[in-house]
Amino acid sequence: MRAVRFESYGDLDVLEVVEVPDPVPGPGEVLVRVKAAGISPGDTMIRRGLLHDRFPATFPSGQGGDLAGVVEQAGEGVDGWHAGDEVIGFASRASHAELVAVAAEHLTSRPAAVPWDVAGALFGAGATAWAAVRAVGASSGDVIVISGAAGGVGTVAVQLARNAGATVIGLASEPHHGWLRDHGAIPLTYGDGVAQRIRAAAGGRVDAFIDTYGSGYIDLALDDLGVAPERIDTIIDHRQAIARGVKHEGSEVGASAAVLAELAQLIADGKLEIPIANTYPLEQVRDAYGELEQRHTLGKIVLHP
């Protein structure tokens, strides 16, 4: 089968699509033929070695967590999945490939109303946003600011916070303000003067802050907006979160088939949208990450193995 591999930490040029042996599902695993697999900034950070202390790579390394596809074979001891089942799931650094062996408990059924590209992009952004919204205790009447509100995680967090009844202020570049307005958020541009713009839009009160971007937003939330530490969550600036006593809960908290099923049902019911910015064939994985790493994408980018 074809799969993405990299032999050392580095930039886009370390990514290769190579022929590797087909995986064989072990006990408790399911072999899935991948139809769509999302990409994420976390993949980039791991590939560059920026997360080596927390998530070291073993070379040659695979890549990718998000996936949607069709079951080809169930391993020993798996009774709940059968050949032909359509599934959404997640795997550790393995989904950017034609085939992947996945733990059976990391899969949920794909509702027919959830398109393949959306299903394949759901796990990373969905689980992370679910955890972040939960971490800040979003509820009716809250005013919540979300940085990077038009990104893969941000777009989901905006909608989940709105579903909880919160007023959402989304920080994003001007071209994405229309999408945010259409989804019930108050869009603001980032950069100089952002604290004043937030206070004006919020009517002077900000209850919670979700940071999906980094670059000083923890300090903004604490020092400029007066948000309580227990109601701030960052998915990216872990060191500063520890230093300043705020939360840093993300995909590891939301990583379960139950959360995936909940999010997939919201999509099927028309209560959640996963914007798909672009799709690429597996062979163009470098181009896909080149677009992602510009950090101006609305929603998710998906690979087609």
Image (spheres, rainbow, N blue to C red):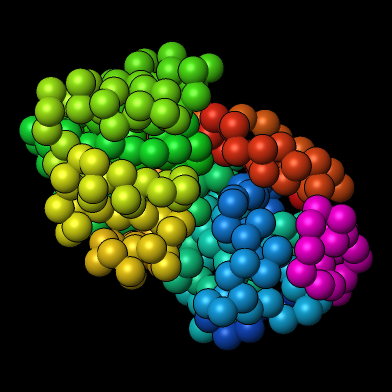
The extreme left residue here reads: 141
- Specify whether 143 is left or right of 79: left
Residue plotted at (60% across, 38% down): 295
Nearer to me, 194 or 205? 194
- Specify whether 140 is left or right of 255: left
Total label count?
0
Nearer to me, 63 or 208? 208
- Residue 146: image location, x then y, percent: 33, 38
Inspect the magenta stretch and tell me whether residue 151 lies in it: no
Q: Is residue 106 visible?
A: yes
Quarter where residue 145 is shown: top left
- Residue 5: image location, x then y, percent: 81, 66
- Residue 288: image location, x then y, percent: 74, 42
Nearer to me, 228 or 97? 228
Residue plotted at (19% across, 53% down): 231
Inspect the magenta stretch and tell me whether residue 14 lies in it: yes
Residue plotted at (45% across, 50% down): 214
The extreme right residue here reads: 19
Quarter where residue 51 is shown: bottom right
- Specify whether 196 is left or right of 48: left
Q: Is residue 126 above or below residue 96?
A: above
Q: Is residue 127 visible?
A: no
Q: Is residue 299 above or below residue 20?
A: above
Quarter where residue 164 is shown: top left
Q: Is residue 247 above or below residue 295?
A: below
Residues in magenta, as a range:
1-22
Residue plotted at (36% across, 55% down): 234
Quarter of the image where the N terminus is located: bottom right
- Residue 135: image location, x then y, percent: 24, 56
- Specify whether 58 is left or right of 214: right
